Image (spheres, helix red, strand yellow):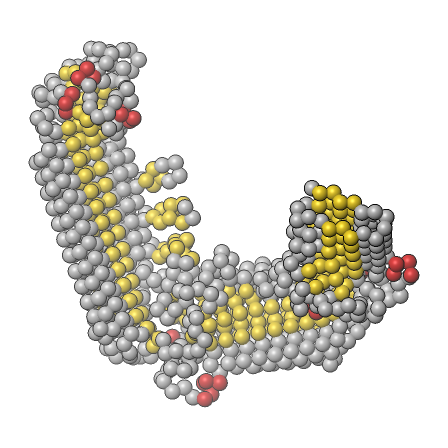
Amino acid sequence: MAIINGTNGNDTLNGTIDNDLINGLAGDDILNGNGGYDTLDGGTGDDTFYTGSDTYVLATGGGGKDKFVYEITNGLITITDFGGIGKGSNPSSAVIAEVDTLQFTGSEQLTARNLQLTQNGNNLEISFEGMGNPYVVLQNFALENLDNLAQVGNILFDGQTNITDSFDVFNANSTQNTIFNKNTVTFLNDLNNNVNGFDNSDDVINGQGGDDIIDGKSGNDILRGGAGDDILIGGAGNDTLESGTGNNTLNGGAGDDYLSADSITNYGYGDPTKNNLLSGGDGNDSLFAFNGLGNNTLNGGAGDDTFYTGGSYYVYTADILITGGGKDKLVYGDNDSSGIITITDFGGIGKGSNPSAGVIAELDTLQFTGYERFTARNLLLTQNGNDLEITFERGYGSTVVLQNFTLENLDNLAQVGNILFYGQTSITDSFDVFDANSTQGTIFKKNTVTFLNDLNNNVNGFDKSDDVINGQGGDDIIDGLSGNDLLRGGAGNDTLIGGTGDDVLLDNSDSDLTGNNLLFGGDGNDILSTSGLLVGNSGTPSKFSGYASGNNTLNGGIGNDTLSANYSTGNNLLNGDNGNDVLSASGSWEYDLLEVFYPPSGNNTLNGGAGNDSLDVDYSIGDNLLNGDDGNDYLSASGTQDESRFNIPSGNNTLNGGAGNDSLYIEYSAGNNLLFGGDDNDLLSAVGALGNNTLDGGNGNDILVGGSGNDTLYGGAGTDIFAFNSYNQGINTISDFNATNELIQVSASGFGGRLSTPSLQKSQFTIGASATTSAQRFIYDSTTGGLFFDRDGSAAGFTQVKFAQLSAGLSLSNNNFVVV
């Protein structure tokens, strides 16, 4: 730290870019910090402080008439002995001699109208609306001592060279009910004030800590509530009302008003946990309730009003009730919030394609911004009794509820409609809605989004068209025909047919977790899902919403398909057919680096069909059947067990690899499982499995890995390897070991006993009932067929353990062992 000392004269002292201590001493000095964390002490005299690009400055005027110049690029300045103007309007000459000045420069927003003064304990914090955290802190300074009079005062705003009477401050004990001057800025005190502005005056009135009633009267006023439960009344004129903390009531009155209970635009001055009532009144008003956790009510009143709601990343909005006549717009701008936004009187486009002028005059718009998944393709519309619920697939946003509103009244036509999607500035004919009583058999247009009604629809899309068709409450049959289609069944027992093309078939909406559905992908690389419901931000699941309980059938057809019946309690049938398919009926997902388990309990059948398939029922507690069929398949009915995750499924599963080089896993399972490798060279693994499992390699050169239970291992035809990871994980029976060419694989680390890779030494193996030397580790009892391990041979420190049962009378030797 550099220490820079002045003289008793008028000095100019420049600091370094590092941390400095600058002492002006006596005289009218200029102190320039120039960067870093600086301590500036002017000493006696009329000093001027320039902080430059400092991150933090601790300044002491030291007596005299000092000036502190704050540029917009500066950091925080703390002033230890700021000289205020004091109470009243006639300061003494002694006070004037010690009055200090703050000069704010560098931005046209540094004005009296944007000034924010906050008493925080003994200190006064000074900032400007819309520009972030406090800029200046006056230590041991009361708000009532800061003021600007006609020619003397404490603050020069951007562009000013002379003090003007630009703001007034109530004394701490003042109970007056009218502000001092028209067209000026006023700061109240911490009492419960009941204060009026002036008619025909553009007043700025700032509440502080009390429960205030502030009436701006006529004029274009700015009213800020501050802390406490406040009532702000704009009156006639185009007013700005900002709630601050507390449960507040904001009434805009006549005019085009701006009302905010927004905890973001106010940079912390709004309290997101409180319940606010915002009433726009007559005029085209803008009402904000963004990032709020409370239950807010927004009433636009007469006029074409705009409502701004939602939340930013990981901020959760609570319930918002919105009402208002006229041609209103709700701007919903979040990508990761939750809650319910309810609109009591939404103006829909109505049925048909030619709305009347009267309908258009009352037509309301929902504008979804802030997240690229807010598209017509991801739009979900659900009729719930008399109300319509609006969400987006994997959008994880709040639900917008239109009260007493039917789906058939929502629509987008060519130039007029109800929804603006992400990135749109004008309405497009992006989705169609069936009338409630429509029984038509074809959607309206190619390559568009269509919502059916609650009847039992039998509806086709178009050939060579990428259609999005959304079922609702009936038992629907939806055939996308050719093209890359997206079909959603909705509630009911639905049949979805993708047809030719790469299709997505979904019957897992929140309203459709109980249906018994049939999904046929057809030709192409399809995705079929009847899984339980996960919701999450940015496409990443973060919340479990419910199990699927229906008994569903998913047929992938030709192509590389993905079939999912995860988080289901039903008995599902998944058929991959030809192609390299992924079939899943499991119960876990990863969120924030933690694996979360919701084990499915149904008894599922997964048939891979021809191709190299992946079949997965991990973490399932049901009794599942997995058939890989032809191809090199991966079949798994496993759980997990490590330091951070623990889930042991208990179902009794059957895994059939079929032809091909297959991998079958039942690791960390508690059930009694059957694994059949079938033809070719297979891997069958029961590592960590607690049950008594049967592993049958079938034809081919197979690798069989037993688990912690008492498993039965059949190698079948071919030259097989039987693997053991430890001597204390149950007793596995090898029913058909061929000592001529088959191997027993053991883990050097798992068994211990100073085994070394890759071969077992001749001295480490013996035939008999027990070890006869200290070097012997593996003992085969040819009379009983028992295979034992002894960590220290004939020494007395370790008792031999039986870990496998083979046939008796085998010509076993150390050459039948491999060490890994």
Q: Quadrant of residue 402?
A: bottom left
User: Quadrant of the image for the N terminus?
Assistant: top right
Q: How many marks?
A: 0
Q: Is residue 59 left or right of residue 790?
A: right
Name the spot of residue 293 as percent of width and height, x first.
55, 60
Above or below: residue 463 compared with residue 526: below
Q: Tell me, yes or no, if residue 5 can be seen here.
A: yes
Name the spot of residue 176 as percent of width and height, x first.
81, 68
Q: Quadrant of residue 802?
A: top left
Q: Residue at x 37, y 63 (%)?
A: 393
Name the spot of residue 694 as percent of width and height, x first.
17, 36
Front residue (pair 687, 452): 687
User: Quadrant of the image for the C terminus?
Assistant: top left
Q: Residue at x 86, y 66 (%)?
A: 89
Name the spot of residue 799 as percent of width and height, x first.
27, 16
Front residue (pair 503, 90): 90
Q: Residue furthest bottom?
A: 357
Q: Tell me, yes or no, if residue 209 can be seen here.
A: no
Q: Is residue 352 left or right of residue 689?
A: right
Q: Residue at x 35, y 49 (%)?
A: 589
Q: Residue furthest right?
A: 93
Q: Is residue 47 left or right of residue 237?
A: right
Front residue (pair 509, 147): 147
Q: Residue at x 38, y 87 (%)?
A: 354
